[in-house]
């Protein structure tokens, strides 16, 4: 294009309004270049915000669900812990009552040696105590129930055997008491006749028939007294020896029953999670048992020496 042609074109454009053309061109370039870029970036920003919003909502939803799960687990654990604590509390109450009952049961076995007590007085508390001990079967573990059942079975066997052996001693004791009553009555009669003789002497009564009658009665009462005293001596000699042997049997039975206790005690301690090792408890228990047996053996030896 020549210079003259360019000048002619510019002149023509000028007459058409160069401002409009230039303005239109600028707007076109803006629309073509900037606006699509802006709109594209704007769209990206909107998409990003929407995505972030969705992600945020998802996170919050997950957090809420997780918190709900945690709360559920916490509540469930609290209920379980509360149930465990209630169970432990119930077990402690049952076991404490059972320990007292077991102690009385052991004392009952020893009490058979006391012949001043009748069988009913000795065994009557066992019915109530057996009920307390039986509750262990409801709350106890398998090992605890097994150990306590073995203990009570041993108590039952010992009770029957001791009552059977005791019956002969009690019969002899009754015979001694009967003979003592006859002896004491004869002694009272003798005292009465002696007092009567004193009064007759004071009154100056020398009637031979009266005095002979009194003497005969005195002789009779003396024979009754002496005969019963002899029976008493013979019965006591036998009773003392057999009673001492029976005392030994009662104590031995008590020791034998006591040896069944560690299994029950250790099982209970495990259930209640009490802080003592099995070895430590057994050392304490066996040491006390040894001391008890030694003390009892010494006691019997001293009694036998006195009776010899």
Image: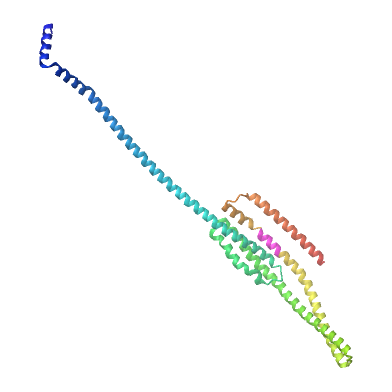
| Residue 221 in sight from this viewpoint | no
| 213 relative to 113 in the view: left or right | right
**Where 69 falls versus 31 (above or below)?**
below
Residue 93 image position (x, y, % from top left): 57, 59
Residue drawn at x 66%, y 61% is 257
Snapshot quadrant of residue 157: bottom right
| Count of number-bearing discs | 0
| Residue 121 in sight from this viewpoint | yes
Residue 14 image position (x, y, % from top left): 12, 14
Q: Nearer the viewer, residue 62 or 130?
A: 62
Q: Is residue 138 magenta?
A: no
Magenta stretch: helix, strand or loop mostly = helix
| 42 relative to 171 in the view: left or right | left
**Where 60 falls versus 187 (above or below)?**
above
Snapshot quadrant of residue 127: bottom right
The magenta span reads 250-258
Q: Is residue 253 magenta?
A: yes
Residue drawn at x 72%, y 58% is 292
Residue drawn at x 81%, y 64% is 305
* Quadrant including the C terminus: bottom right
Q: Nearer the viewer, residue 247 or 206?
A: 206
Residue 241 image position (x, y, % from top left): 77, 69
**Residue that lies at the very extreme toward the top in this rendered image:** 3
Q: Nearer the viewer, residue 272 or 145?
A: 272
Residue 212 image position (x, y, % from top left): 87, 90
Q: Nearer the viewer, residue 168 or 293?
A: 293
* Quadrant including the N terminus: top left
Q: Which color scheme did the rendering employ for the protein?
A: rainbow
């Amino acid at each position: 294009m020549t210079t003259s042609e360019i000048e002619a074109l510019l002149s023509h454009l000028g007459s058409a309004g160069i401002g409009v053309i230039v303005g239109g061109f600028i707007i076109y370039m803006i629309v073509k270049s900037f606006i699509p870029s802006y709109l594209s970036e704007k769209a990206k920003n909107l998409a990003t915000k929407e995505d972030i919003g969705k992600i945020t909502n998802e996170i919050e939803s997950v957090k809420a669900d997780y918190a709900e799960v945690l709360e559920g687990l916490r509540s469930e654990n609290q209920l379980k812990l509360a149930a465990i604590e209630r169970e432990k509390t119930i077990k402690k109450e049952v076991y404490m009552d059972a320990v007292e009952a077991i102690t009385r049961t052991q004392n009952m076995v020893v009490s058979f040696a006391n012949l001043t007590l009748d069988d009913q007085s000795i065994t009557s508390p066992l019915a109530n105590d057996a009920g307390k001990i039986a509750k262990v079967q409801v709350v106890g573990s398998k090992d605890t129930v097994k150990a306590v059942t073995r203990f009570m079975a041993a108590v039952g066997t010992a009770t029957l055997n001791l009552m059977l052996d005791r019956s002969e001693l009690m019969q002899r004791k009754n015979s001694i008491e009967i003979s003592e009553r006859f002896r004491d009555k004869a002694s009272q009669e003798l005292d009465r006749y002696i007092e009567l003789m004193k009064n007759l002497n004071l009154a100056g009564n020398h009637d031979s028939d009266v005095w002979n009658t009194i003497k005969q009665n005195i002789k009779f009462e003396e024979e009754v007294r002496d005969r019963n005293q002899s029976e008493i001596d013979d019965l006591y000699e036998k009773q003392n020896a057999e009673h001492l042997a029976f005392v030994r049997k009662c104590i031995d039975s008590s020791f034998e029953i006591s040896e069944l206790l560690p299994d029950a005690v250790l099982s209970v301690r495990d259930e209640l999670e009490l802080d003592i090792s099995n070895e430590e408890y057994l050392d304490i228990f066996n040491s006390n048992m040894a001391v008890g047996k030694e003390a009892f053996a010494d006691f019997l030896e001293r009694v036998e020496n006195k009776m010899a």
